[in-house]
Amino acid sequence: MYAHWLGLHRENPSQQRYWSTDLYRHLWRPLSNRIERREDGRVAVRAILDIAQAEKVSELEAWCRDQAETVLALHDIEADEASSLRVAKAVAAQVQRASLTLSALARGEPEASSATVRAAVSTAKPSTKAVGLTELVEAWWQEAERTGKSDSTRESYTNAIRQFSAFLGHNEAHRVTVDDVRHFKDHRLASRKSNGQLLSPTTVKNSDLAALKAVFGWGVANGRLTENPAKSVTVAKVTKAILREREFTLDEARALLREASQLKPGRELPQTFAAKRWIPWVLAFTGARVGEIAQMRRQDLRREAVPGHPEGVWVLKITPEAGTVKTKQARDVPLHPQLVELGFPAFVEGTRDERLFLVPGTEGKIEGPLQAVKNRLGEFARRYVDDPGVSPNHSWRHRFRTVATEAGVPGNVIDAICGWSARSVGERYGSVSLKARTDAIMRLPPIAL
């Protein structure tokens, strides 16, 4: 963004009048007033910004948000509101920096001085106060929770910080260096999982380093630290050999669904038995994420009148009210006729407990029980499909898209059913109706065992 803005105006730097560098410090802040005391003793309240300035600030903020959405869409990145705002603020900082450089060029100077740029862009005052790693991650979570971060993210980041502290032998965040982070990365890459296999580079990058970068970055942004020692540390991307498609084949799907249909209750919890019996079938005809179905509640299934379907349609509501939904958005998924014929709605209506497939823990928490159900489902599937080239749960999602595409379902309808974000700004306009989703589901062929 810095290079783009500079290149856009470099030939005529004095003509850059859109970005107001003097208003940058007012971006992303609530409009406030100034209290003035007159000579006669009266108190007057004056706005810090006049109407025109306030409107310009709003315009610049909206422009930065548009730029952020464009960047995220171009890179096919799904981002929540808080993350989009972070990108918008980053865009603003770089345009401010480039605009200061253009102002210097307009005055005949080679570039804006580093001190000027740092003073204009920086919004955080470094703190010299010592801060502990544990204290830092807890403070990060207090804000992250309000921005929609999930409890699973908190658990992952907290564990990463705890392991990092144990590796260092101390808990002082301000003492951490870039070399400390690099050595920890190497240590984690050499660590092994419970099954004896080495941790994957992707896990180290997306779990351990992501936690350090996010928590230290929050510390810098909020004046707890002067720098982010994890910022430049990364793991080289490893390209794996792909020996097959990622979805289940028809034979693999049939094998899993056959075993699910023939499953008999054992010593396990009734909810675990129900999960193995029904969730593979639901995944096959919804393209949902396994956790979205495993956390399902009795009230999430309803019968709905849909034009063109006189007998009505059973509709599954996948919603953040039930637990974790990656996009933080609820969506309706009509049930395929084969699911109805097999008796899934009857099973749901006959269940007494609110949760169909898990038993909540203390205070109604479902994170631990939910992970346990997903693990049991993975183990169940692996007994019948042991090919490491497919995921025991997620491959249903890949298969759904393939089958739906073969059935002629439009891509935007598939995205709406599966909960994928729009791939372009244009696709964010309008919506996919329940009728369109129902018509699409009805086009999917039944699976004969």
Image (tube, rainbow, N blue to C red):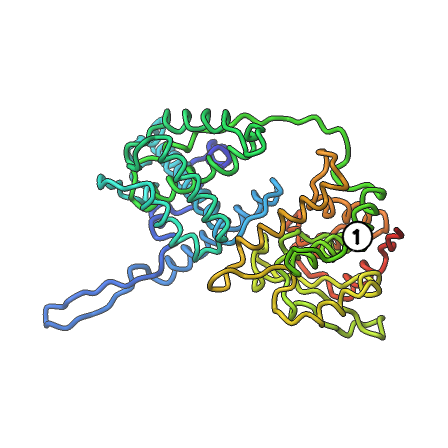
- The crowding category of the residue bearing disc 1, from other C-alpha atoms within 10 Å (few below 14, some 14 to 19, many at least 20), is few
| Residue 24 % position (x, y) | 36, 48
| Residue 231 % position (x, y) | 42, 33
Horizontal placement of 344 versus 68: left or right? right
| Residue 414 % position (x, y) | 75, 53
Q: Nearer the viewer, residue 80 or 319?
A: 319
Q: Residue at x 24, y 40 (%)?
A: 130
Q: Nearer the viewer, residue 394 or 28?
A: 394
Q: Is residue 14 in view from this perspective? A: no
Label 1, on which residue?
410
Q: Residue at x 30, y 62 (%)?
A: 32
The disc labelled 1 sits on which kind of residue?
Pro
Horizontal placement of 352 versus 280: left or right? left
Q: Tell me how many marks there are.
A: 1
| Residue 104 % position (x, y) | 35, 33
Residue farthest to the left, as pictured: 40
Q: Nearer the viewer, residue 272 or 227?
A: 272
Q: Nearer the viewer, residue 139 or 155?
A: 155
Q: Is residue 442 in view from this perspective? A: yes
Horizontal placement of 293 versus 42: left or right? right
Residue farthest to the front, as pictured: 267
Up-down relation of residue 271 to residue 301 (above or below): above
Q: Answer with the quarter of the image where residue 50 lies.
A: bottom left
Up-down relation of residue 325 to residue 72 (above or below): below
* SS at mark 1 in the image: loop
Up-down relation of residue 56 to residue 393 (above or below): below
